[in-house]
Image (tube, rainbow, N blue to C red):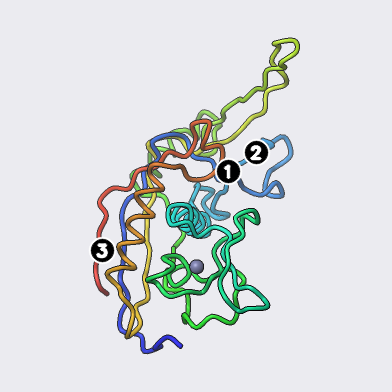
Amino acid sequence: MADLKLEKYIAISGILKCKTGLRIGGSKEDIEIGGLDNPILRDPVDKMPYIPGSSLKGKLRAVLEYKHDRVGWSIDRNSGEPRQDKNNGQPCGCGQLLNICPVCTIFGPHKNTRHKLGPTRIIVRDAIITDKSREELEKLAPEGLQYAEVKSENTINRATNVAGDPRQMERVPKNTEFDLNISLRVFRNDDSETMVKYIQEALTLMQKDYLGGSGTRGYGWVEIRNLEIKDC
Ligand SMILES: [Zn+2]
């Protein structure tokens, strides 16, 4: 079992900037009558967009799993050994130590309740909009836009070459900035340097990939600025 004496936390912070429109979908229950079909996620109180920690954590984990070939690993029920089934598409649940699996110690092994890694080390906070971006988005209000842009999307019918009914998608406008905050728990025997290295790698990969929905069509290109890593 992992040594559960907590030594410290490492704070990883920065600014997450949207280089293109970002779409993290909200719930349809939140829309008012006459509202859009595809609203973005908003804070229920101030109605400003935010990026949930779960979306960020999921993305960081997924890019790291792809990079290190950790997709589909689990513990074989009969042999108790880790095995990979690339076709199941599940997150890594191998439960192996950091020198074998960069994902399970940091992010927690998926659907594996018998591992000995100790608690998930990473805590990804919801990313809240910066004060500067809040002011920028408030300028949209007189145009009837609720702190977001509305993008129309269409599908071309291949037989007739005619566009179908457009769908209205809400997005966080490009250049909007959010405060990125990650806290890393470090227990006595943890290799914190390696854990930080993997988180940095995941952040780098995310910037080459995308965050949120419709990334292959231009949404969700993000940039991390002013990255700071310090013990606390
Ligand atoms: Zn694993």
Q: Residue at x 42, y 73 (%)?
A: 121
Q: Quadrant of the C terminus?
A: bottom left
Residue at the spot 51% in from the left edge and 37% down from the top edge? 215
Residue located at (30% from left, 68% from top): 194
Marker disc for residue 40: 1
Dot 2 and dot 1 residues touching (CB under 8 Å) = no
Viewer-nearest of labels 2 and 3?
Answer: 3
Q: Is the residue under label 3 in contact with that under label 2 (CB below 8 Å)? A: no
Amino acid type at image mark 2 = Asn
- 64 or 26, which is in the foreground? 64
> Between 85 and 50, which is closer to the camera in this rendering?
85
Q: According to the image, label 2 marks what residue?
A: 38
Residue linked to disc 3: 229
Q: Residue at x 42, y 38 (%)?
A: 221
Task: Please identify, in this view, whether the residue under mark 1 or under mark 3 is nearer the observer.
Answer: 3
Number of labels in the image equals 3
Give me the C-alpha separation between circle 2 and circle 1. 7 Å
Pointer 2 or 3: first along the chain:
2
Q: Check disc 1 and report its element: helix, strand or loop.
A: loop
Question: Looking at the picture, does residue 80 appear above or below residue 33?
Answer: below
Counting other residues with Cα less than 10 Å from the Cα at mark 3, is it few (<14), some (14-19), or many (20 or more)? Answer: some
**In the image, what residue type sits under mark 3?**
Ile
* Quadrant hosting residue 145: top right
Q: Amino acid at mark 1?
A: Ile
